[in-house]
Image (cartoon, helix red, strand yellow):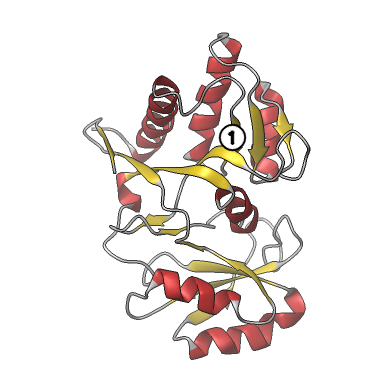
Amino acid sequence: MLSQSEQKKLVGETAINRLFERGLIKNGTKIGLGTGSTAMPAVKRLAELISEGKLSGIRAVATSYQTTIACEELGIPVYSLSSREIGGKLDIAIDGADEISPENNLIKGGGAAHLKEKLVEYNAAQLVIIADETKDVASLGTKFPLPVEVFAEARVPVAAALEKLGATCKVREGVKKAGPVITDNGNIVLDCVWEKPVDAAKMEDAINAITGVVENGFFTKNHPIVFISHADGSVTER
């Protein structure tokens, strides 16, 4: 039986291999690369295909400092979403998720990178999500906290507005740092949970309508291909 870390490696490598075999990743592809412990094996496998001479002309947009540094170290060319080489649109994006519903709606942002992840992944022609089996859940909103990135000065009124939407909120605190987590964009994160499952698509829009909210971690508008690895060594796709 595979451990969770082994499942993450398996699904990342399997997804890149299948996408390459199908021609969804090919020479010249503009690709968004996600953040976190599941995305990193995919990034490394992509770099292997480049170093083996099987891929060339890859243009990547990274979703965080973590991914940018990994790409630089692995020899994957990195651009901004607004660079001429990218032109604001990507062929494909691949990333992990914190929770995946049966409808393939997502909660993302456990690493507090969901703003740039959403910018990248909502501007990709095809989104691909990779995850181990623990991320496959029956519903969203009650277990893994939904991250809401907020301007620091707006913390109190935004929290009050979120509570009116039924959420219980708390500021995400740093690890090995005193005080709150500060995102790559200089904002704070409110982590939110609900007593009952919520309609992720409606809640994504409702939260983003609150003044002071920068972005939230519901992803419902670019339905992905999802690869899920299992402890028995299999990988399912939906």
Which residue is depicted at the point 52% across and 63% down? 217
In percent of width and height, residue 231 lies at 25, 37
Q: Nearer the viewer, residue 120 or 189?
A: 120
Check the image and name the residue furthest to the top. 53
Residue 193 appears at what percent x and percent y? 44, 75
Q: Where is mark 1, residue-wise? A: 31
**Viewer-proximal residue, 23 or 157?**
23
Q: With respect to residue 18, does 108 lie above or below?
A: below
Q: Using the rendered view, name the quadrant where residue 78 is placed.
A: top right
191 or 210, which lies in front? 210
**In this orientation, which residue lies closer to the viewer: 31 or 34?**
31
Q: Which percent across, then down, holds residue 32?
A: 59, 39
Tell me the kind of residue under disc 1.
Ile
- Characterize the local packing of mark 1: few (<14), some (14-19) or many (20 or more) Cα atoms within 10 angstroms: many
How many numbered discs sit on the rendered protein? 1
| 206, above or below 7, in the image | below
Is residue 36 shown to the viewer in this render?
no
Check disc 1 and report its element: helix, strand or loop. Answer: strand
Say whether residue 63 is left or right of residue 205.
right
Q: Quadrant of the C terminus?
A: top left
Q: Is residue 17 left or right of residue 78?
A: left
Q: Does residue 223 appear left or right of residue 28 in this picture?
A: left
Q: Is residue 127 visible?
A: yes
Q: Position of residue 172 (x, y in %)?
A: 60, 68
Residue at x 39%, y 57% (from the top left corner): 99
Task: Decide: is 30 above or below 228.
Answer: above
Q: Which corner quadrant holds the N terminus? A: top left
